[in-house]
Amino acid sequence: MKPLPLPKQKNLRADCAWVIYQILEQGKSSRECLERVQRRHNAKDNAWIQEMSLGVMRRLPLLQHWLRSLLDRPLKGNKKVIEHLILLGLYQLNFSRVSNHAAVGETVAAASYLNAAGLKGLVNAVLRNFQRENLADKPVDDAIINSGLPKWLFKAIENAYGDDAEQVRNETNAMAPIWLRVNKLQTSLAAFTQALDKAGVEYTLSANHADAVILTKRVDITALPGFEKGHFAVQDGAAQLAAHYLKPQANERILDCCAAPGGKTGHIVECAPDTQYVLALDADATRLKRVEENMTRLKHTVDIKQGDAANPDTWWDGKPFDRILLDAPCSATGVIRRHPDIRWLRKANDIDNLAQLQRRILDTLWGLLKPGGTLLYATCSILPKENMAQIQQFLSDTPDATLSPILKTETVDKPGRQITPGEQQMDGFYYARLVKSAD
């Protein structure tokens, strides 16, 4: 599908349809598309665009099912974006607080901003027919369509989780809460929650995370008390486990590999402020800017380098590390509830390619670890091929690697901790801790 320019004039629904088109037809991430569009709108409209476009991602199979029954033939070429505008209209009618009148009228009007004024009648007819035929009230007897997931991922979850698959799918489609990690080098949990109370911000605490606060309502993060002073970082509860499982100590050399945007890097420093050296490495220069910004705001001092983890000759100083956190490139299937576009950006054959890349990086970094050192392998995936199966094979192939159990139930045949989406309100994550023989 050929590139589609951003509409010349801003319009809420036209811009939202453009975002949906970019994700589904151009394979762009929602973050990238939303950043471009949201420069044109105020904060309230930006929140609406994000809610609607990501909502379409969550309900896409059902929306497409309705669209296919309402549209005589698919639209092609420059007209294709109108299909995405109609998907937005269908979502508004059935899943949003937008009035039916506005959902139809404003969506029809948006076609003009997409250079398709001649298709306004088609948009109007499709949306009116949807209402007239009461399609929303007619059950769809297809588990995959109802799951909101692509077929390959539906089956992968089914194969991995068996009787628990439905719960995993349901949690994958749920809305994720916002977790904050209190920067204990700058404030305390008590002082921070007191400031939240004073500001009228609603939150709960976690029984399993000593430095965590979970917001119960969506808020402007930058407006929270202590943001500019670096009193907290936004970090999901599952990601907050990384530093604790790594167990950094004083006077150690530590590598955080694939570190952007730096949440785990900052937590490592907060857990061991007197450690000797922390290196935050990432291959993406743009994302490393986020690491720099976050470290500056949190008032942490670390070394930040751009480099390919599988090619250390370009960035490594030759001194082995005491501990390595490998937050490996992965399918991100554990954070789909937070980034629903991921389900449509990932393909089935990506998993084998990612598993090969993970193993290549794991083998490489193992050579950079001191004898007796610890490597923590982490992904935000829920698929065994990237997680348990990966570590099983590595342990089998690597004589000087030993499993250091995180859970008492771990064995070499079932290594690591797999967290599923929604478990203790956390994202889906996997951790396995490995120790290198001292001999």
Image (spheres, rainbow, N blue to C red):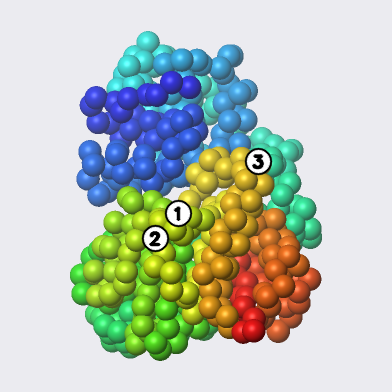
Residue 79 horizontal side relative to residue 288, left or right = right
Residue 286 horizontal side relative to residue 163, left or right = left
Give the label on residue 162, or none: none
Callout 2: helix, strand or loop? loop
Image: 26 above or below 149:
above
Q: Looking at the picture, how far across and down is residue 219, in whole percent? A: 32, 62
Residue type at mark 1 is Asp
Give the alpha-carbon distance from disc 3 to disc 2, as whole Å.
Answer: 31 Å
Q: Is residue 213 something one can see in this rendering? A: no
Residue type at mark 3 is Asn
Residue drawn at point x = 64 percent, y = 51 percent: 356
Among the 4 quarters of the image, the one containing residue 204:
bottom left
Give the alpha-carbon distance from disc 3 to disc 1, as whole Å.
Answer: 23 Å
Which residue is more in the foreground, 84 or 349? Answer: 349
Image: 415 above or below 147:
below
Among the 4 quarters of the image, the one containing residue 363:
bottom right
Callout 3: helix, strand or loop? loop
Q: Looking at the picture, how far across and down is residue 221, in whole percent? A: 29, 64
Q: Which mark's residue is nearer the viewer, 2 or 1?
A: 2
Mark 2 or mark 1: which comes first in sequence?
A: 1
Give the alpha-carbon distance from disc 2 to disc 1, as whole Å.
Answer: 8 Å
Callout 1: helix, strand or loop? loop
Circle 2 residue: 315
Residue drawn at point x = 65 percent, y = 40 percent: 349
Q: Which mark's residue is nearer the viewer, 3 or 1?
A: 1
Circle 1 residue: 308
Circle 3 residue: 349
